[in-house]
Image: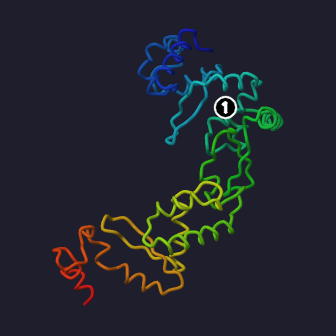
Amino acid sequence: MALSRDEAELVYKLCLENNGIFTEDVFGRHIAKFRNSIQHGLVSNSVDFINFLKLLKGSRQYSFHQDAEGRKYVRLRDAVSRQQVARLQDVEYAVFCAIETAGDRGIWTADIKKLCEITGNQLTRSLRVLVEQHGLVKQVTNVHQKNRKLYMLFNVKPARELTGGSFYFNGEFNEILVEHIQEQVGGFLAKYQGSSLTQITNFLKTSDKISGEVVEEDVLSIIKTLMLEEKVYSAPTATGNTIYIWAGGANVSFASKAFGTPCFKCDISNACQLSKEHEICPAKCNYLNQWLA
């Protein structure tokens, strides 16, 4: 069974009104208008949204997706995308949709076969067309399961869970890159003591010697390694943030004591003056005098 003309026009209209997206929530608010499907028992309430999506499979106007919570929705394709999928045979389009729905986590070939109910030969031929002939799909490597062939749309960036983050290249851990970043971090902290994670990350992003994406999560792992090697020390600030200090070859306990002064946790340090003439100064600070004693 296919959608009636009125229902197809309604879905299209609702997509335009909702930034090109048709969700279960939108469907539920207008469910009474989908009379044709209701009469045939396919739709009784919003729980049957998944069944309704199956009717949309016959139209190549929509792409199929799911959010982080696993909720499915469709998006109205743009003109270029509609032209691309219009050239595909039915089996090729079914494979394309399975890959499209998987998003940035990709999909295993065995799962494609199961979802599309096709043979291995059909899958191989379809992937060849999608990858080599049309350039719509690409193969990606999961650093945790390298033997599994995963596929995703060509213009989709793989999730970090697949790529392993900044320290992996083509699925392999880049030890040379990690050592180079450690040197960069050490050099930066030696020059700018007391820098934050964001400041260190922004510095690395400007380095012409580091290719690929640099994110704070990966930089923090580098810093933690340097801390275990007692080359870097961390200290809290008065605002509750964390700064990092380069100890290098010195005894890290010296840095720990030096940056453990009350000044680093003082919430009025900006108003502190060196001169004894000021009310707020080191000479009149009870906390500093107790610490020095």
Position of 143 with respect to 46 (left or right) is right
Position of 216 with respect to 109 (left or right) is left
* The C terminus lies in quadrant: bottom left
Q: Which residue is mark 1?
A: 97
**Residue drawn 34% across the image and 79% down it:** 260
> Where is 270 relative to 252, above or below?
above
**Residue drawn 71% across the image and 29% down it:** 94
* The N terminus lies in quadrant: top right
Position in image of residue 91 (x %, y %): 76, 28
Position in image of residue 30 (x %, y %): 43, 18
Position of 255 with respect to 183 (left or right) is left
Position in image of residue 170 (x %, y %): 72, 55
Q: Residues within 10 Å of mark 1 (few under 14, many from 20)?
A: many
Tell which residue pokes out farthest to the bottom in this image.
Answer: 293
> Where is 122 relative to 80, above or below?
below
Position in image of residue 185 (x %, y %): 55, 69
Q: Amino acid at mark 1?
A: Cys
> Where is 111 relative to 245, above or below?
above
